[in-house]
Amino acid sequence: MIKVGVIGASAGQGWAGRSHIPALQALDDYELTAVGTSRPESAREAARLHGAAHAFTDAGELAAHPDVDLVVITVKVPAHARLVRAAIAAGKHVLSEWPLALGLAEAAALRAEAERAGIRHAIGLQARHSPAALRARELIAAGRLGRLTSVTAHVTRSKGTGATTTAHNAYTADRATGAGLVEVAGGHTLDLLEFLAGEITEVAAATAVQHPRLTVAETGETITASAPDHLMLHGSLASGASLSAYLQDAKRTDPHARLEISGTERELLLTTTPRPDMLAAQIQIGELSLFEARAPGEPWAPVPVPADDTLPEQVRNVAALYRDLAADLRDGGHRVAGFGEAERAHRVLDAVSRSAADGVRRKV
């Protein structure tokens, strides 16, 4: 059994409670032994609710406890570096939610520190573990599409619709938190794109804040948004294929994720079903369906992929990541993206952000 301590495992409606903890509880390889939150009473309540033996408010104490083999970090991005370093100092394996850090330099430093410590490090880029994405990767690698010519991504979320936000999401409107559209939806989308079609080599990007003032629904407070709610980019892949992507918040109708990969022989489409639920519409959370088309004008034909209906939709990709991580810990494999892949994803976003700031096409 891999004994797990989850930092950020509150008793409320956070991401840990919606995905990580149900995933761990569904898998025979893991035992949730410890939880950590910022306050003693909330830590004790989280331990009671989730069935953990230990409750902590100090990340160092959680990581150092002998009943913890793997530290899972599911809190806001500004705290990631400090908490990752607590796990490294204790010599424990660590899984951090994406984004890993508040920028490329911090991500590179964490990757180097984790490698020096010799621990297993993993990043929550769970779209890579979607059954549809894995099948698409197999088809592309087998040459089914011929020579790749273009990749097009369109990802929209309902977040900020009506210039309102929930209290839970209000902090993401501040660009300094590293959890806006560019970092979260952009990071997951562009990482999956590279996982399937190869590395991005150049980008030209633009961002916009179309809703600079947001009202917090629960309190009526008005806040100023500095994080972009629109991202437009085009670029090139190492294969020579062209890239275009458009990401948008505050979508009033049918939020969805759609990724088309075109080749000289056929095309693939990965897509989520449009729905009002912002979480389920995102490429890393919603259940992806896979389609292909060969001839001009031919309708998209479904490509069969394994289905797992035993877990809630928000849990499935995270559970698949944990299954692969358990296998990696057993045999030393590399099925799960680590901090090296996280650094690469931050490097892509760094090029995107610099291009958006000065209008210059950037090499990645």
Image (tube, rainbow, N blue to C red):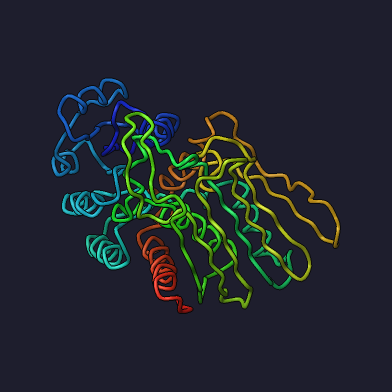
**Residue 160: % across, % down:** 46, 42
The quadrant holding residue 70 is top left
Q: Which of the two residues, 363 or 24, is positioned nearer the viewer here? A: 363
Q: Which of the two residues, 326 or 226, is positioned nearer the viewer here? A: 226
Specify whether 79 is left or right of 28: left
**Residue 67: % across, % down:** 21, 35
The quadrant holding residue 152 is bottom right
The residue at 21%/26% (across/down) is 42
Specify whether 111 is left or right of 163: left
Quadrant containing the C terminus is bottom left
Q: How many marks?
A: 0
**Residue 313: % across, % down:** 54, 34
Quadrant containing the N terminus is top left
Q: Is residue 46 above or below residue 65?
A: above
Specify whether 307 is left or right of 168: right
Q: Is residue 252 above or below residue 127?
A: above
Q: Which of the two residues, 364 or 46, is positioned nearer the viewer here? A: 364
The residue at 60%/69% (across/down) is 243
Q: Which of the two residues, 63 or 150, is positioned nearer the viewer here? A: 150
The residue at 49%/39% (across/down) is 162
**Residue 137: % across, % down:** 62, 58
Q: Is residue 359 above or below residue 206?
A: below
